Amino acid sequence: MAGRTWAELEAAHGEAPRAWIDALADPTSDRGPPEGETGLALHARLEGWLAALPDAGEVVAFTHAGPLLAALRLTVGLRAAEVRPGGVATLRRAGGAWWLAELRVPPDLP
């Protein structure tokens, strides 16, 4: 999927890319794009990364919508959100619990 537009993926694979995205969004799925992570592997990788973050201070991460949505699902249980390029999610951890402090969606571009 890397380096290809959605139109290119659909032209080459029909409806399959939508199923790949749906599988990646499912933390229990053993499916995903060919030669890519499964939903289970993606969520496990992000869970490990989240657990390794320091308890205090700030961490800035730049990522695609899929990992951001997975992190929101793992931390605050948010199962759906509109995430576009340039969006910002601010999470805070206190007492072992995660809090969504802000979810900013950029304005539509002209």
Image (cartoon, rainbow, N blue to C red):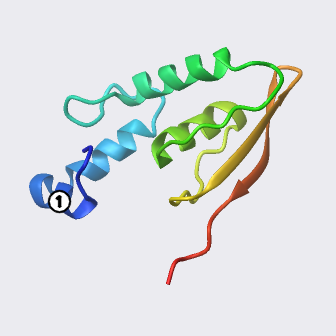
Percent coordinates x, y for residue 44 in the rendering = 50, 20
Image height of 58 relative to 69, above or below: above
Image height of 99 relative to 8, above or below: above
Question: Closest to the observer: 35 or 106?
Answer: 106
Give the residue at x 27% y 30%: 36
Percent coordinates x, y for residue 4 in the rendering = 23, 53
Name the quadrant containing residue 104: bottom right
**Amino acid tagged 1:** Glu
Give the residue at x 19% y 33%: 34
Image height of 85 relative to 90, above or below: below
* Residue furthest left as drawn: 12
Task: Please indicate whether residue 20 sits to the left or right of residue 47 in the image.
Answer: left
Q: Secondary structure at mark 1?
A: helix
Image height of 32 relative to 80, above or below: above
Q: Which residue is mark 1?
A: 8
Question: Closest to the observer: 19 or 65?
Answer: 65
Task: Please indicate whether residue 74 sits to the left or right of residue 7 in the image.
Answer: right
Question: Closest to the observer: 79 or 47?
Answer: 47
Task: Please indicate whether residue 15 sits to the left or right of residue 48 in the image.
Answer: left
Give the residue at x 10% y 54%: 12
* Quarter in which the N terminus is drawn: top left
Percent coordinates x, y for residue 33 in the rendering = 25, 37
Percent coordinates x, y for residue 24 in the rendering = 39, 37
* Residue furthest right as drawn: 95
Task: Please indicate whether residue 22 sits to the left or right of residue 14 in the image.
Answer: right
